[in-house]
Image (tube, grey):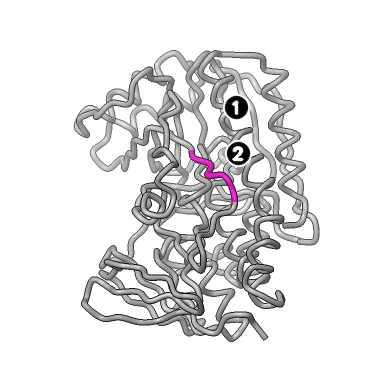
């Protein structure tokens, strides 16, 4: 029997939904509140690693991912001129038969998990958040934005990288820090020759593509920028096309024309990271996902470590003798894995920005990939 019987999850992102779904499997009553009334994840495509697919399989949504996304193995590496350098293997995660990786539209993955959340019996309220959290010895009283009040044994906070709850409970933690690099993403038609992720390595700009469905792929371009800037949306297509101009590979040249078309969906994000020192709970309130462990996308594991944390928290709540025991076990399983992803991703980011040692880049990628395949 779980050490808690009634839990509130604040935030309906990937990690919050994963925690809610898995807690319901342990017969815990779960309320979930999400401030976005449309409950719609933003963004273009998302690269999903094998370990993340393993986590989605554990939740029970891998079949839907397979139907609505794209699965593949390996990452192809090319020079800017189109000469094939080699391939980075994406080994299967330990204890699972899922492929080494895949891709999907971020809103599509959000819909898959949202459907699974409701099907699990989670009580969902959208367009709702909280105004006050008051902790007592045996429970937590929460006042919501609709004026209602409810009491819970535990509050799980997954309200994102700009969490107001983190600012409230961890005032000593600085907001996420810009890391000096931005990523541009665009959704484009998928040509037949793109059957797995492909990257072109050249200078301080890295370009890549990943299929997200049988018909489409998304392109990502990372660029070093000294300062975090606001850029007019109307300028985005030309800026990205200009960044690709030094790449003479005919495949990339063809993509540039799509970028300039009116139907190209482009997303621009300055990159930041965050790692809050453990423990991630204050009393009966615990923070998970991007709220405490936000990474840059260099290991394609940001969503993955958040989803994993939701799974692990539910597992420990189901088997621990006390709530503190559950917290201790949770932190023991999550801290080092999250730290590795965030710090190694930052190291890869620095190497890219500085056009640094490719051997070091390969070593960090290889060690991280092998580490992530291990059980959670």
Name the spot of residue 206 as percent of width and height, x first.
51, 24
> Residue 136: which quarter of the image?
bottom left
The magenta region covers 274-278
Q: Secondary structure at mark 2?
A: helix
Res 248 seen here: yes
Name the spot of residue 233 as percent of width and height, x first.
22, 34
Q: Residues within 10 Å of mark 2 (few under 14, many from 20)?
A: many
Instruction: Name the quadrant of the C terminus.
Output: bottom right
Give the vertical position of 95 relative to 27 (above or below). Answer: above
> Residue 351: which quarter of the image?
top right
Instruction: Check contact, mark 2 vs mark 1: CB within 8 A.
Output: yes
Q: Which residue is mark 1?
A: 348
Name the residue: 57% across, 76% down: 23
Instruction: Name the quadrant of the N terminus.
Output: bottom right
Q: Report how far apart the C-alphas of labels 2 and 1 lie in the structure.
A: 9 Å
Main secondary structure along the magenta-highlighted residues: loop
Label of residue 87 in the image = none
Q: Which residue is mark 2?
A: 299
Q: Secondary structure at mark 1?
A: helix
């Amino acid at each position: 029997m779980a050490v808690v019987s009634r839990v509130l999850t604040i935030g309906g992102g990937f990690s919050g939904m994963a925690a809610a779904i898995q807690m319901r499997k342990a017969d815990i009553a779960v309320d979930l509140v999400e401030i976005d009334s449309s409950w719609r994840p933003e963004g273009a495509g998302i690269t999903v690693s094998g370990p993340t697919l393993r986590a989605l399989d554990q939740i029970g949504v891998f079949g839907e991912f397979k139907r609505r996304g794209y699965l593949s193995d390996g990452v192809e590496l090319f020079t800017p001129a189109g000469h094939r350098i080699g391939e980075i293997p994406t080994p299967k995660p330990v204890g699972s038969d899922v492929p080494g990786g895949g891709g999907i539209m971020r809103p599509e993955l959000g819909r898959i998990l949202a459907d699974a959340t409701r099907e699990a019996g989670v009580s969902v309220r959208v367009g709702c958040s909280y105004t006050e959290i008051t902790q007592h010895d045996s429970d937590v009283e929460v006042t919501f934005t609709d004026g209602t009040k409810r009491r819970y044994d535990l509050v799980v906070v997954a309200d994102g990288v700009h969490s107001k709850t983190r600012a409230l409970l961890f005032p000593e933690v600085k907001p996420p820090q810009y890391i000096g690099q931005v990523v541009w993403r665009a959704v484009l038609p998928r040509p037949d020759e793109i059957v797995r992720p492909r990257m072109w390595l050249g200078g301080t700009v890295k370009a890549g593509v990943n299929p997200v469905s049988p018909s489409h792929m998304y392109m990502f371009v990372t660029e070093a920028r000294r300062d975090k800037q606001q850029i007019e949306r109307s300028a985005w297509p030309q800026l990205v096309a200009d960044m690709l101009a030094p790449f003479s590979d005919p495949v990339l040249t063809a993509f540039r024309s799509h970028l300039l078309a009116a139907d190209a969906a482009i997303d621009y994000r300055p990159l930041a990271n965050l790692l809050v020192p453990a423990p991630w709970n204050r009393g009966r309130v615990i923070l998970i996902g991007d709220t405490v462990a936000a990474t840059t996308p260099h290991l394609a594991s940001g969503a993955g470590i958040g989803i994993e944390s939701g799974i692990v928290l539910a597992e420990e709540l189901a088997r621990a003798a006390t709530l503190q025991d559950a917290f201790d076990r949770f932190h023991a399983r999550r801290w080092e894995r999250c730290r590795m992803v965030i710090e190694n991703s930052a190291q890869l980011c620095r190497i890219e920005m500085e056009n640094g040692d490719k051997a070091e880049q390969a070593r960090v990628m290889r060690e991280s990939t092998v580490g992530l395949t291990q059980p959670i």
